[in-house]
Amino acid sequence: MKSQKIIGYGEPLKAFEEPNPQPIGTEVLVSISHCGVCHSDLHIHDGFFSLGNNRKLDTSGGRDLPFTLGHEIHGKVAALGPKATGIDVMDECVVYPWIGCGTCAQCENGQENLCGSNRNLGTRKDGGFSDHVLVPHPRYLLNATGVPSGLAGTYMCSGLTAYSALKKVGEISEKDKILILGIGGVGYMGLQLARALFRETILCADIDASKRDAAFKAGAKEVYDPSEQTASKSVIRDTSGGVFAVLDFVGSEASVGFGRKCLRRGGRLILVGLFGGGIEIDLPLMALQGHSMIGSITGSLSEARDLLALVKKGKVAEIPIEERPLDQANSALDDLRDGKVIGRVVLTP
């Protein structure tokens, strides 16, 4: 088994070669054909999230080094443990990586992605920057037949994260609009899913001109540059009072500040991005404007199944994919960190 592993936080990944894991019990060994590179991989690789004001949230706990990143995994079943049923060797699948403890309230409610004692692949347990991965149970393998190979794994994080966030918008009226803030890998996926769910009601904003251009070509009704002083006023003018929902796929002080200015009364900001920082909230204004802020992290197993069904029906336009060999994992992380990626870089072991 060949893998690219963290040997020290903030240090380049290192190539490893070791025996393939042998599945026991209900475990399944998956031979990986593709694995997406995600912003979450950057924070795990760095060992922290920035909280602003020189504060950091340590992300180095909960795993042993060397450690294999990667949670957007697509491949085929290579071997089965003796108690793994309902799936066969060579079945094509994507891996649902947000695996909980199985016994807490969140897990019993079908929200393993919110489990406080999770066993997530690529964040707690070795993931997909490798040519094989060990999955604890067949229920976490979803049939990927008919889904383009390079895209399939990305639906388990960037797609699922965007889908779950968009489901939190709820029902909107014909006059309401949605603003997608940040057109990186998850935001671009969010635009495609939003068009499938909410039709021609989608506005986009990004400080990068090339990403605004990509969003407009992909079907955004209007695009804005948040760095312009009048941008929020333009959104309010163009929507006759502001948008009902902002999907913030950046998660910085600047992006949240801009997003809140764009909300209409009774609007909601759904915070997805993890760039980092902190904000100050005027509590009376929050109540008087009827605004709400909702955090959204990945998505449930049932949402993953619903998303794949939507994709297989041809309802979701494809995002740009750039495939790179596994040994280019470090340069993929660097390009993502530098904001050079539109769509998704996918490693091909």
Image: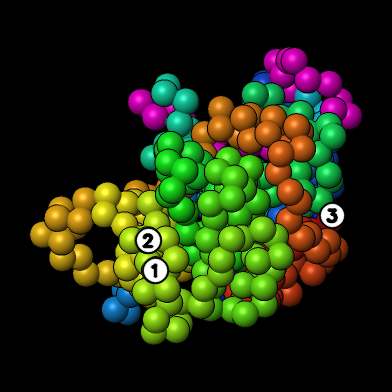
Residue at position x 83%, y 32% from top? 145
Q: Quadrant of residue 15?
A: bottom right
The answer to whether any part of residue 341 appears in the image is: yes
Dominant SS in magenta: loop
The answer to whether any part of residue 30 appears in the image is: no
Q: Which residue is mark 3?
A: 349
Against 223, residue 291 (above or below) is above
Secondary structure of the residue carrying numbered label 2: loop
Q: In the visual, does 288 lie left or right of 154?
A: left
Q: In the visual, does 139 lie left or right of 20?
A: left
Residue type (three-letter) at the residue carrying disc 3: Pro
Q: In the visual, does 183 lie left or right of 105?
A: right
Residue 300 location in percent, x, y? 52, 34
Secondary structure of the residue carrying numbered label 1: helix
Q: In the rendered structure, find residue 237 and report the number of the disc placed on it.
A: 1
- Which is more N-terminal, label 1 or label 3? 1
- Circles 2 and 1, Cβ within 8 Å, touching? The answer is yes
- The segment highlighted magenta reads 81-107
- Local packing at callout 2 (Cα closer than 10 Å; few below 14, some 14-19, many 20+) is few
- Circles 3 and 1, Cβ within 8 Å, touching? The answer is no
Distance between mark 3 and mark 1 Cα atoms: 49 Å
Of residues 4 and 164, the one drawn nearer to the viewer in this rendering: 164
Residue type (three-letter) at the residue carrying disc 1: Arg
Residue at position x 39%, y 57% from top? 243
Of residues 44 and 296, the one drawn nearer to the viewer in this rendering: 296
Residue type (three-letter) at the residue carrying disc 2: Ser
Q: Which residue is mark 2?
A: 240
Q: Which label lies toward us, 3 or 1?
A: 1
Residue 294 location in percent, x, y? 34, 49
Secondary structure of the residue carrying numbered label 3: loop
Residue 245 location in percent, x, y? 40, 52
